Image (tube, rainbow, N blue to C red):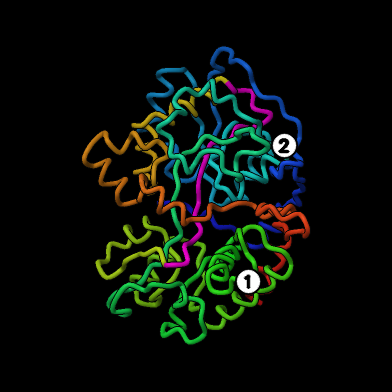
Amino acid sequence: MRGNKLAAASLFAASAVVLSACATDSGELTLDVPDVPMIEELGDFEGELNIVNWSGFVEPAWTDQFTADTGCVVNARVAGTSDEMVTLMRTGEYDLVSASGDAALRLIVGGDVQPLNMELIPNFGDDIAEGMKGQIYDTVNGNPYGVPIGRGANLLQYNEDVTGGEPESWDVVWESDSPYAGKITAYDAPIYIADAAVYLMYHEPELGIENPYALDDTQLAAAVDLLKQQNEIIGEYWADPVAQITSFVGGNTVVGTSWEVLRKFADSPNLKTTLPIEGSTGWFDAWLLSTTSPNTACAYAWMDYTSQPDVNGAIAMNFGMAPANLAFCATSEEAQAHCDEFAAEDEAFFDRIWAWTTPIEQCIDGRTDVTCTSFQDWTNAWLTVKG
């Protein structure tokens, strides 16, 4: 099961950084990042590899073979939140991290991770999902910093016994007249502001929101107003997946944000998920390599090894997400069933998902006449939502 990857507000505040950027004459977004060199060639295997990872990403079922092949002994440290991952990577004690988009850009701009030489990762090829290549959360100024692992959507989960059918819209969790007031759940994290922005993009186009992670002051204020409205009808916020499952199964929650894997773990036929008409947000995870890693040969070998269809698929199935390497889907009936369940090959589905991305002052929607709100601004705003 996915660990608690959603951060408490205090932790976000402690680790937040203000990111800066500019636009080229051609309009291409460029970010001000430290000049960290890219490795041109690899030496001998160093004998060990230290990884910060989400629970379920690093298991003996695939690390044992990797160690047998390379002699690199894998030492894994499970982190519970993106902020914990950022903090651990900044200790200099870890070589790799399985970062989500709300951590990756912080590490890149902080100079904590290095650009990757994809020619040294031959398994990063045509079979990697197109929607996980070249994304702004881990590709900066044309340089890739991440090797995709897998992805998932934040879906609307509902108790069909109560709703009597599939909700078409997120309005059941946002509007004051929701028939499920008091039995609604939502993420407990600043990044959830993006979910409010996605709803406003559809229902209040006059706000001009083009990207839920590029909000100017007026747009952020509108999102916060919506979140405060929702706060009046929330039954409970969740950061612990187990608590969320328990709440749905126990009937305390009827509708709210969830992951497909959580619905699966709930194992209740009345609990279902849907992607509403407004679309949604989601998490796209990738391996990032520390700037100070002394074990780069082992790290590159790991990123290549885990990009193989069978290993990447094993991680995806163990965790409960869509694999990055779509060649896995055709390896067996079980693999295909998993890919179908998590929409792995459905790029049209993921086109409606806004991958978590750290908000920065440069408007990543291309606007140059305003300053957008930063991650710190979002952290401060989130504190006002819950009072």
Residue stretch in magenta: 277-296
Q: Residues within 10 Å of mark 2 (few under 14, many from 20)?
A: some
Asked if 360 appears above or below 110 in the picture, the reply is: below
Task: Name the front one of labels 2 and 1.
Answer: 1
Q: Residue furthest left?
A: 333
The circle on residue 52 is none
Q: Quadrant of residue 229?
A: bottom right
Residue 207 drawn in magenta? no
Q: Horizontally, is 297 left or right of 18 in the view?
A: left
Q: Quadrant of residue 146?
A: top right
Tell me where residue 216 appears, x and y as whole percent. Answer: 72, 64
Depth order, front residue of 131/147: 131
Q: Dividing the picture into quarters, in which one does residue 192 lie?
A: bottom right
Residue at 63% of width from left, 64% of height from top?
209
Q: Which mark is residue 111?
A: 2
Element type at marker 2? loop
For marks 2 and 1, give the CA distance.
31 Å
